[in-house]
Image: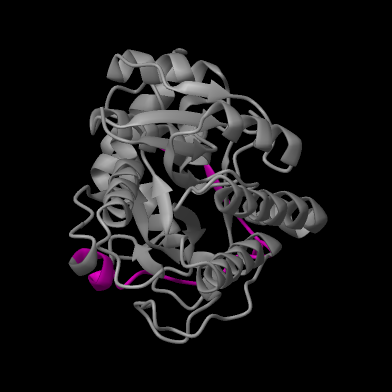
Amino acid sequence: MKNRILVTGGTGYIGSHTVVELINAQYEVVIIDDLSNSYASVIDNILKITGKKPAFEQFNLCDKKLLDQFFKKYTDISAIIHFAASKSVNESVEKPLKYYRNNLMSCINLLDAMREYSVPYMVFSSSCTVYGQPEKLPVTEYAPLQTPSSPYGNTKQICEKIIQDVTISNEDISAISLRYFNPIGAHTSSLIGELSTGTPDNLVPYITQTGIGIREFLRVFGNDYDTPDGTCIRDFIHVIDIADVHIKAVERLLGNKNKAQYEFFNVGTGRGYSVMEVIKTFEKVSGKKLNYKILGRRPGDIEKIWADTSLANKELEWVATRDLDEMLLTAWNWEKHYRPVNI
């Protein structure tokens, strides 16, 4: 086996898919997750997919005492992939202190532990929300960072700055931030997928839950944006493509191939799809007609964004390969597997 990688938030949506790909790439994995927005059963499903059960510790990273105990127990961590964070744009507008407390303190505590326990590398789960509404599209890594439209986006921007400052002050720590766009889809086994503990905030799980009858109708927030059909445009990317780029980033750090102590890359497909395009594509691949209603704009949403991914394509030797049809079909298959009801 290769090095041991700590994955925080590893039972969550992107985290669990990344754990699967790490195990498939022969890495040892240990997960920290407080299960505030995920389920312990994900661990068993990772075992079913990979044949290997990752080590798992349940606690919140804001608890520094428990984090110290963790690193005293696991003394061979080679790198950290840091996903753990509260992640709802909408909820962050309603509960900003929760987001600042949880997202900032967890990151600070991890960086403290990296210095104290000599863990040299971090891959940080960042977000395209750091760009706000870009002035030019597609957005490149060199675009000026706008004031984020939500506290969630602000925490990602602040965490990036904290990580960058730590790498400047400590030559023993290097980090890569992956600014990904809109992850959707599920593992082809349908054993893991996007599963929140409450009402979904993201478009695709709301679509699949509407398709299967859990939700009465799909809410479309705004149809008066300056886009071809009036609905918001996003760069949707398959979650396994995102998992793959985390492996590339870890290997770049472990192989000392990074060109600076702090690097950041866009992770997307480079193509924007509107909400209505996603709805129509889902109807095509699933054969289900969706009931949806147009509502007013939602606070914190931006109008349109998609990525220029050429830097990640070149430096990480990575490219997203899965199209929108596959993204939505795997999401639908996951929904049907998780909720086998009469459809």
User: Does 316 lie within the magenta span?
Assistant: no
Q: Which residues are magenta?
A: 286-313
- Based on the displayed image, in which of its 4 quarters is residue 221 positioned? bottom right
Residue drawn at x 52%, y 34% is 12
Task: Tell me which corner region of the image, top left, top right, bottom left or bottom right, holds residue 260.
Answer: bottom left
- From what the image shows, is residue 150 above or below residue 66? below
Position of residue 279 relative to residue 295, above or below, is: above
Q: Which quadrant is home to the C terminus?
A: top left
Question: Which image quadrant for residue 311?
Answer: bottom left
Q: Position of residue 142 (x, y in %)?
A: 39, 83
Whether 322 is drawn above or below 330: the answer is below
Residue at left offset 49%, top offset 85%? 144
Give how far across and how far down residue 58 sits, in percent: 63, 25
Query: Magenta stretch mostly in which secondary structure?
Result: loop
Residue 339 in sight: no
Residue at 64 percent of width and 53 percent of height: 112
**Residue 271 in the image, given as x and y percentages of width and height:** 29, 65
What residue is drawn where x is 19% and y is 51%? 321
Is residue 310 part of the magenta span, yes or no? yes
Task: Out of 152 and 120, give the one closest to the viewer.
Answer: 120
Residue 189 image position (x, y, % from top left): 29, 22
Q: How is the image coloured?
A: one colour
Q: Which image quarter is the N terminus in? A: top left
Q: Is residue 339 shown left or right of residue 299?
A: left
Of the pair 24 and 235, the residue shown nearer to us: 24
